[in-house]
DNA sequence: AAGCGTATAGTCCATCTGGACTAATCGAGG
DNA sequence: CCTCGATTAGTCCAGATGGACTATACGCTT
């Protein structure tokens, strides 16, 4: 295996791998699906980055070409499939990012893909996040108090105050999420999607036969 | 002027310009100050990026060299100063980012540097942000309802639920911030810092004479 | 007084990213 | 039936980033 391929995964790379767990695709279709699902809330989808990301993933042996077809005279469409390493890499990346409270952008992606983990695994990681959040929250409170005591002017502290408020909100949200997963109010695990996008994929597969 | 230099400012670039409003500095000192103030919560400070950013800002005529000194046999220290365009650019960038609800990372920096704006200006921009936040919040609520109606499995919606919760929290935080600025409970405007870091800068200036 | 870690002040380069561009096809309106 | 805009599927490259590397000096220990 390439040296710590998981650590080098970019957010877009993770989303690509996660998409391929649902079926083989060519990059253009990944972009279309992600836009349909509003995944562009989480990452910027630009062509240059997408195609480059896919070729990096291929070099890292996390995915591979499975064929090239063409429709009329349009450009070729290279279809990709996950390797076993690629399938594992998504899970490892999510496990790594889910408890981290620095890197908010990465966390959102990890959370969005957390359904790829087993319930117990996700629960454990989220509980660790909870501890880290409590820590962080305390650090912000402390920092604010000390800064005020030192006479730091309040207008330069507003960003920290906001962060403190958001950390509080995230903590209460996380508590309810954890209990919903724990008492199985929330279904979990890598289950079938069953939504429109999947019906779409199923249709494409059927049409290809 | 270079074509829309403000739009091309990177987060680190903005922080560099903002720092230079406090006094002339060489890049290494910028890094030290930012680390001291924990600005690395907002941006990654790596040498390569910092020096490259400074030279880009110089090319864009937002800052300029004012001298090169050296201490013993150590590497030269090139000191930089803001140009008028650079001074304005910080303000323009903050004005542009403060109302935007996409780009959370940029917003945190805009908020941290918002004390460079006049009170009325900041108030106006934050009120516009308030409207955008309310919009966003509604969109997330709607999206969630529709997705549930369509039968989208709930484990893929947790990230949106979190976003909805955080938007709500941000909204209440913003409301109190706006009223604090409005009733002048919170002092505002580009005033002197008066904190340790400034005393440090003052000492350095004194020592140089 | 030699050695070791850390602070100072950068340079260099392999990647990574974003935006502009190409080029073909399809559907709808005039 | 012709043309305009949108969609499909990608290439290309300038510029941005991050991390490794260089080189000196200073303080502290042993």
Image: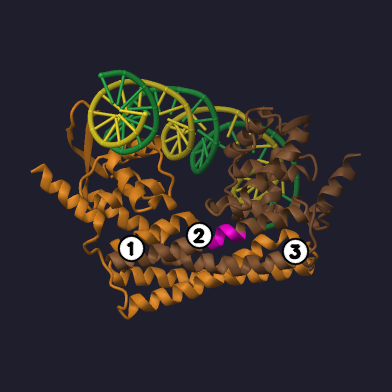
Chain colours: A brown, B orange, C green, D yellow
Host chain of mark 1:
A
For label 2, count other residues whose C-alpha is less than 10 Å away and answer few (under 14), some (14-19) or many (20+): some
Host chain of mark 3:
A
In primary-sequence order, the first of circles 2 and 1 is 2
* Point 16% across, 46% down: residue: B204
Image coordinates of residue A92 in percent, x first then y, are: 69, 43
The residues colored magenta run: A130-136
Q: Is residue A47 left or right of residue A67?
A: left
Quick one: SS at disc 2? helix
Image coordinates of residue B86 in percent, x first then y, are: 26, 49
The residue at the far left in this view is B209
Write down the residue under mark 2: A136
For label 3, count other residues whose C-alpha is less than 10 Å away and answer few (under 14), some (14-19) or many (20+): some
Q: Are marks 3 and 1 in contact (CB under 8 Å)?
A: no
Image coordinates of residue B1 in percent, x first then y, are: 28, 45
Write down the residue under mark 3: A181
């Amino acid at each position: 295996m390439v040296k710590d391929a998981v650590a080098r995964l970019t957010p877009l790379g993770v989303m690509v791998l996660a998409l391929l767990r649902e079926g083989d695709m060519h990059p253009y279709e990944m972009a279309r699906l992600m836009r349909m699902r509003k995944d562009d809330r989480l990452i910027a989808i630009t062509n240059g980055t997408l195609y480059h990301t896919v070729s990096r993933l291929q070099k890292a042996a996390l995915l591979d070409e499975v064929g090239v077809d063409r429709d009329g005279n349009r450009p070729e469409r290279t279809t990709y499939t996950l390797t076993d390493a690629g399938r594992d890499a998504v899970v490892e990346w999510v496990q790594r990012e889910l408890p981290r409270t620095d890197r908010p952008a990465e966390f959102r992606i990890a959370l969005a893909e957390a359904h790829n983990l087993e319930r117990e695994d996700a629960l454990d990681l989220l509980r660790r996040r909870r501890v880290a959040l409590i820590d962080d929250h305390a650090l912000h409170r402390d920092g604010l108090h000390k800064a005020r005591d030192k006479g730091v002017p309040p207008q330069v502290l507003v960003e920290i105050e906001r962060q403190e408020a958001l950390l509080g909100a995230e903590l209460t949200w996380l508590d309810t999420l954890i209990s919903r997963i724990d008492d199985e109010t929330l279904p979990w695990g890598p289950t079938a999607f069953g939504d429109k996008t999947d019906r779409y994929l199923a249709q494409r597969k059927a049409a290809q036969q």
